[in-house]
Image: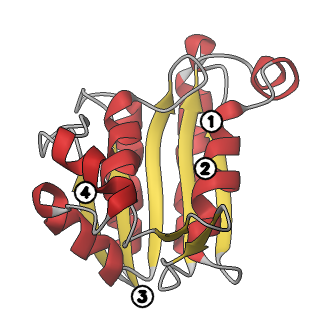
């Protein structure tokens, strides 16, 4: 399989970046990997006026993000590695979805019927490795996990019906310990090695 790993975190010495490296290294043993580090690539999350104007009136102008669009179209699987801040993904990753998972790539508009048709049927694996500063009960029970909902209710369906998925989260990072971080990294390594 060709698996793209999309990462967003501004610091290379972060725990999240270490998870990204673990995912890429583990996958590389059995798969072709497209490692996409949005911060190191200095990806601009800001949708341009031209992109927005072409969003509904097509064709969508993907000129500025054509390399990322081609990587997405080429991949058989995709894994996102990022932290949740304020119960959501970093702006860099949100901008990636806004600009790259656009009409003509991720979906086709049916404006008359008010529906969209998934186009990323090449994606057979949809994975998430993430962290939260908050404990699991606050994230899941009180806030109802808005970040997970966006990923699994809005984005994963663009990949079609047969996509396999997983979601690995390290909660309570604000009070994490070396032991909890090591245990979670091992959980990630084990799950990734099964792919």
Instruction: Tell how many labels.
Output: 4
Give the Cα separation between the discs numbered 4 and 2. 18 Å
Residue that extends furthest to the right in the rendered view of this protein: 141
Residue under the point 40% across and 67% down: 26
Q: Disc 2 vs disc 1: Cβ atoms closer than 8 Å?
A: yes
Q: Quadrant of residue 147?
A: top right
Residue linked to disc 1: 147
Left or right: 69 with respect to 107? Answer: left
Q: Give the camera-side residue of 135 and 56.
A: 56
Q: Which badge, 3 or 1, comes first in the chain's sequence? A: 3
**Residue 190 at least partly seen:** no
**Residue 132 at least partly seen:** yes
Residue linked to disc 4: 36
* Residue 130 x %, y %: 54, 40
Up the image or down, 186 lies above or below 117; here it is: above
Q: Disc 3 vs disc 2: Cβ atoms closer than 8 Å?
A: no
In the rendered image, the quadrant that contains the C terminus is bottom right
Residue under the point 37% across and 71% down: 105
Q: Give the camera-side residue of 33 and 118.
A: 118
């Amino acid at each position: 399989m060709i698996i793209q790993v999309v990462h967003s975190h501004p610091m290379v010495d972060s725990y999240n970046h270490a998870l990204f490296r673990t995912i890429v290294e583990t996958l590389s043993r059995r798969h072709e990997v497209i490692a996409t580090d949005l911060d190191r690539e200095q990806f601009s999350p800001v949708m341009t006026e031209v992109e927005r104007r072409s969003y509904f009136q097509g064709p969508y102008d993907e000129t500025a993000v054509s390399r990322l669009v081609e990587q997405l179209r080429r991949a058989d699987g995709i894994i996102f590695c990022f932290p949740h801040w304020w119960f959501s993904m970093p702006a860099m990753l949100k901008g990636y979805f806004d600009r790259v998972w656009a009409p003509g790539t991720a979906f086709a508009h049916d404006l008359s019927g008010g529906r969209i048709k998934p186009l990323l049927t090449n994606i057979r694996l949809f994975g998430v490795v993430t962290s939260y500063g908050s404990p699991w009960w606050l994230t899941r029970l009180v806030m109802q996990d808005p970040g997970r909902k966006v990923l699994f209710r809005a984005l994963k369906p663009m990949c079609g019906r047969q996509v396999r998925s997983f979601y690995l989260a390290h909660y309570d990072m604000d009070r994490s310990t070396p032991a909890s971080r090591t245990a979670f990294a091992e959980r990630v390594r084990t799950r990734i090695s099964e792919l």
